[in-house]
Amino acid sequence: EESDFFSDDKEILQPEEINLINDVAQVRNIATSIYKRELERSKQWCELQCMTEDITKRLCYQYYSYSFITSCREPAKRLAECQEAKKKYMMEKGRNWRDKQVAKYEKIVSEKLHRQQHNFKE
């Protein structure tokens, strides 16, 4: 289901992990790593969203087994366009999720590092 990917309630760090982060760049690396994993996982969802186009293309290939390259160009094109649109949608959703997570955790980590520096000076 679409909501299984890049949901707002998916946290990239647990509270105890925040204490282990000493650089905001680590937050970006963690978010990007999760983004890539989720994007890979979403490929199957994208394919399922285009099932009608896939079935139409397969039926066409079966019916026109000797001339499918010319006879089935349109169904193949529709399938490719559908899959591309779903992938782009999921990538955009993922980028937005990653940007929100990075902003959220960069702020938390920056504040933590600032407090540590302030406490060190005292």
Image (cartoon, grey):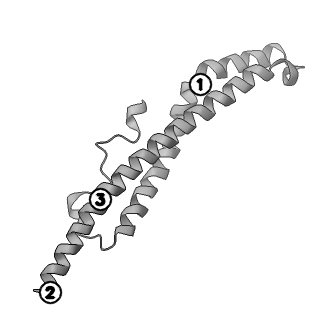
Left or right for 38, reference 73: left
Element on which disc 2 rests: helix
Amino acid type assigned to the residue bearing label 2 in the image: Lys
Q: Is residue 117 above or below residue 76?
A: below
Q: Nearer the viewer, mark 2 or mark 3?
A: 2
Label ID, residue 50 = 1
Left or right for 12, reference 32: left
Nearer to the camera, 57 or 99: 99
**Which residue is at 30% across, 50% downward?**
11
Q: Nearer the viewer, mark 3 or mark 1?
A: 3
Give the percent coordinates (x, y) of residue 50: 59, 24
CA distance separating discs 1 and 2: 59 Å
Quarter of the figure with the N terminus: top left
CA distance separating discs 3 and 1: 35 Å
Q: Are dots 2 and 3 in contact, CB under 8 Å?
A: no
Q: Residues within 10 Å of mark 2 (few under 14, many from 20)?
A: few
Q: Earlier in the sequence, mark 1 or mark 2?
A: 1
Q: Earlier in the sequence, mark 3 or mark 1?
A: 1
Label ID, residue 121 = 2
Left or right for 89, reference 71: left
Residue at image mark 3: 105
Q: Is residue 37 above or below residue 93?
A: below
Label ID, residue 4 = none
